[in-house]
Image (cartoon, helix red, strand yellow):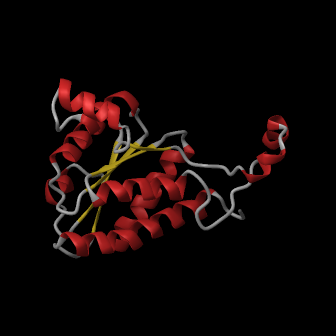
């Protein structure tokens, strides 16, 4: 079953990127660190070099353009501390991710919500907002998926309950996800 859902997650992300969409990622604590890690694997080459098209390299016209790589648009919603603080202070402490989703999400985009329990209220609010805006939701959770399971277009749930065990299982899962997306979108790179 997880293999089928994994394939669905790869399809969801590839379709998003192929249609010009972007991936928004959020989580708390270690899951927030995972959001940054996922961004790092997709915005530049992960397992493959992704050289620029020669015409683009020529338009840049600089020797360092050889080091640039084709990337995928990913936004980590956990890192804008000034905005997160402003939303928490001026609106509600559980709204910083949902507020960013309001600003960034468009139909065809994907929100990846990460929560070991599947019950992180700020991530749930971001998923509800994303769905209202026509974006798809991918959830990366622990065993039962928590409340996020009902909001996810695709649920990838690690077979563990303890936070550290779920996090240990999330790492190879999202690495495999990033590899599969990269292989499909950058063949021969």
Figure quadrant of residue 61: top right
Pick the residue in front: 36 or 169.
36
Q: Where residue 68 sits in the image (x, y, percent)? A: 71, 49
Residue at (83% x, 41% y) in the render: 62
Residue 188 visible at all: yes
- For this orientation, the residue located farthest to the top is 90
Q: Where residue 89 sits in the image (x, y, percent)? A: 19, 28
Figure quadrant of residue 130: top left
The answer to whether 161 is drawn above or below residue 89 in the figure is below
Q: Is residue 18 left or right of residue 134?
A: right
Quadrant occupied by the N terminus: bottom left
Q: Is residue 177 left or right of residue 78?
A: right
Residue 139 visible at all: no
Q: Where residue 51 sits in the image (x, y, percent)? A: 74, 54
Pick the residue in front: 176 or 166.
166
Residue at (17% x, 36% y) in the render: 93
Quadrant occupied by the C terminus: bottom right
Q: Where residue 156 sits in the image (x, y, percent)? A: 30, 64
């Amino acid at each position: 079953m997880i293999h089928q859902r994994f394939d669905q997650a790869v399809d969801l992300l590839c379709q998003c990127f192929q249609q010009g969409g972007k991936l928004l990622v959020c989580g708390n604590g270690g899951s927030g660190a995972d959001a940054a890690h996922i961004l790092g694997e997709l915005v530049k080459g992960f397992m493959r070099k992704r050289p620029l098209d020669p015409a683009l390299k020529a338009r840049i016209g600089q020797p360092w353009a050889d080091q640039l790589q084709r990337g995928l648009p990913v936004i980590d919603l956990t890192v804008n501390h000034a905005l997160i603080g402003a939303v928490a202070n001026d609106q509600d402490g559980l709204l910083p991710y949902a507020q960013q989703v309001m600003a960034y999400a468009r139909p065809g985009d994907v929100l990846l919500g990460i929560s070991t329990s599947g019950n992180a209220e700020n991530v749930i609010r971001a998923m509800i907002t994303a769905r209202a805006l026509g974006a798809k939701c991918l959830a990366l959770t622990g065993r039962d998926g928590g409340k996020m399971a009902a909001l996810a277009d695709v649920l990838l749930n690690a077979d563990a309950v303890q936070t550290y065990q779920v996090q240990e299982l999330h790492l190879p899962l999202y690495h495999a996800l990033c590899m599969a997306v990269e292989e499909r979108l950058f063949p021969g790179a």
